[in-house]
Image: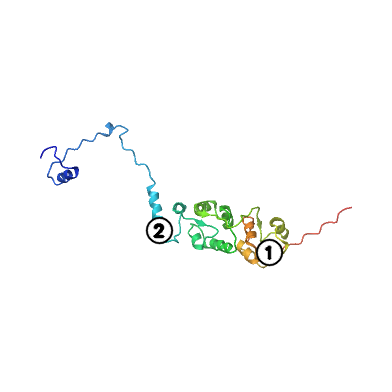
Amino acid sequence: MAKGHWLDPLARSLLEATGQIPRAPQPAKPEPSQVEPSEAEAPPAPDGSDESVERELLALKLAQNPGLRLTSAQQVLQAAALGWRLDVNRATAADWLRLPGCTPTQVDLLLRLQSGGVQLSGPEDLQKLLGLEAGLIRSWTPLLEFRWYGDAPTAAATLDLNRCRAEQLGAQLALEESRCRRLLQERSRAPFRDLADLQQRLQLPAELVEGLIGRVSFGQGPIGPELPRPPRPPASR
């Protein structure tokens, strides 16, 4: 067979593999020292393929189990990249329980407030309401959406509703006298557990409770009696 035969590369490879024609000699590889820097193989650039594989795997798991609980801040980021969001003011118990570190007790409080019409305006509200550590609220934030269904409230300073004096309720919280009396009566029966308990026992409107987020706390120790103030000394003439 002539040297310059007409076989295409595929046919040539097949004949070489079966031994019907001799293999063409391969050019010798140059020593590494002889390779020009521009010809040397550059290391492959990181393309984030591992991360994309993890994200696709999470997408598959979420498709198979919509109630899958996320276990880390990294999974929260991946779920956010897939387009998942949690509408804080409309979320269900299952939505909240997907978040890493979110407890059933916290979910119960959130749902009771939601059923009373209370809305949260940002991560700070959620952090104060649940007493979350800064790192935990940061890990949730990529998934959280705070859509406001109405007019947003304004904010101010904090007061323990289970220990404060009667006059502080009116002065610091601007509560009506009738509500102050009702609050003190209810508090004498049992301390308030949280904002949702306060709202339910006093039948407070949602907008008033929203204005109390971050401004009040609920100490759970024994409540001491409210002592009468001493009489003022007579003015000297």
| Residue at 64% over, 57% down | 211
The residue singled out by tag 2 in the image is: 61
Disc 1 on helix, strand or loop?
Answer: helix
* Left or right, 59 with reference to 120: left
Image height of 201 relative to 216, above or below: below
Q: Does the rendering let one see residue 62?
A: yes
Residue farthest to the right, as pictured: 237
**Numbered circle sitting on residue 183:** 1
| Residue at 39% over, 55% down | 57
At label 2, which amino acid type do we have? Lys
**Residue closer to the observer: 48 or 208:** 208
> What is the quadrant of the N terminus in the image?
top left
**Numbered circle sitting on residue 224:** none
Give the number of marks.
2
| Residue at 27% over, 34% down | 32
Residue 19: x and y in percent read 13, 45
Q: Does the rendering let one see residue 218?
A: no
* Left or right, 220 with reference to 227: left
Q: Nearer the viewer, mark 2 or mark 1?
A: 2
Please tell me which of labels 2 and 1 falls first in the chain.
2
Residue 148 lies in quadrant: bottom right
Residue 109 lies in quadrant: bottom right
Residue 84: x and y in percent read 46, 55
